[in-house]
Image: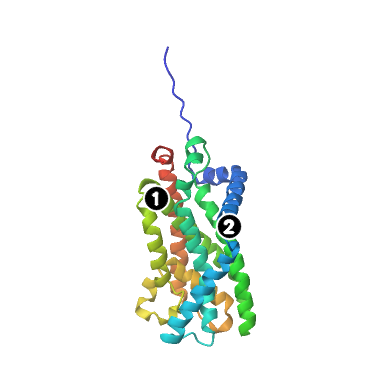
Amino acid sequence: MSKFELIIEPDKTIKNFWKELWQYRDLFYFLAWRDVLVRYKQTVIGIAWSVLRPLLTMIVFTIIFGKIAKLPSGDIPYPLLVFAAMIPWQFFSNTFSEASNSLINNTQLISKVYFPRIIIPTTAMIVSLIDFAVSFAIFIILMLWYGVMPDIKICLLPLLLLMAILTSLGAGYIISALNVKYRDFRYVVPFIVQFGLYISPVGFSSSVIPEKWRMLYSLNPMVGVIDGFRWCLLGKDISIFWPGFIISIGFAIFLFLFGIMYFNKTERSFADII
């Protein structure tokens, strides 16, 4: 009697990839809600961390870059300039950091049942969206305090948030897959976040970058995200370097698509390695 071996593998074409994610949307909701509960369950001040971290960073950067280094901010109060950048940066850093260890933290789930593994690092973005909403509410209060009002450009803010999501998830997919195979990457993640904070225009305006370096500087997709947020939120007194912004958008889309492809390519080995 001949033997037959049946191997069931997921179809990884783009069309079926999105279709499969939709089929497992209930699992996505469950894991996202679980991550939200776990995030604040054992903390003393809970969701207040979403307020303290950007506020303290804003104060430090305002003192160092605004008061001591006296970097220009135009007619915009320096605290607002910094906080408008901290909102998307905190979203990126939280998503990236949480996604990096997400697969390792769900070892038992991955090794026992099949589902699209990419759901796990994606849920990190949901927790970050809650922090984003809290920080944005604080930013509105600061704008009222300083008497700075946005103009019609604020309607484009959802598109800038989408750009931040693509950048965060793309980087998160890559680092989470790498962290499964090479556990040393868990030590690299804090360095990347810290280094990225200083090479991104969080504590300063992109206008201080020399003109000859602006295009190269814009290869960092968070440059476009942060500049876009400031341009949307802080009214007519903020300009944007459009060639660099377009480069940042293109690189953000590329990072997201490459992250999906790399994650899907390495996904089949996760259960064996973990």
Query: In the displayed image of the protein, which residue is found farthest to the front?
Result: 44
Q: Amino acid at mark 2?
A: Tyr
Q: Position of residue 135 (x, y in %)?
A: 58, 69
Q: Position of residue 94 (x, y in %)?
A: 50, 61
Foreground pick, 128 / 119: 128
The quarter of the rendered structure image containing the C terminus is top left
Check disc 2 and report its element: helix, strand or loop: helix
Q: Could you tell whether 141 is left or right of 249 in the image? A: right
Residue named by callout 1: 179
Residue sitting at x 53%, y 71%: 54
Residue named by callout 2: 40
Please tell me which of labels 2 and 1 falls first in the chain.
2
Which mark is in front, 2 or 1?
2
Q: Residues within 10 Å of mark 1 (few under 14, many from 20)?
A: many
Q: Amino acid at mark 1?
A: Asn
Q: Is residue 149 visible?
A: no
Between the C-alphas of marks 2 and 1, the distance is: 24 Å
Q: How is the image coloured?
A: rainbow
Check disc 1 and report its element: helix, strand or loop: helix
Q: Is residue 46 visible?
A: yes
Residue 242's disc is none
Residue sitting at x 59%, y 44%: 27
Q: Position of residue 253 (x, y in %)?
A: 47, 60
Q: Is residue 60 above or below residue 170?
A: below
Q: Residues within 10 Å of mark 2 (few under 14, many from 20)?
A: some
Residue sitting at x 49%, y 84%: 73
Foreground pick, 66 / 178: 66
Q: Is residue 182 above or below residue 152?
A: above
Q: Could you tell whether 181 is left or right of 172 in the image? A: left
Query: In the displayed image of the protein, which residue is found farthest to the top?
Result: 1
Q: Quadrant of residue 157?
A: bottom right
Q: Position of residue 215 (x, y in %)?
A: 38, 73
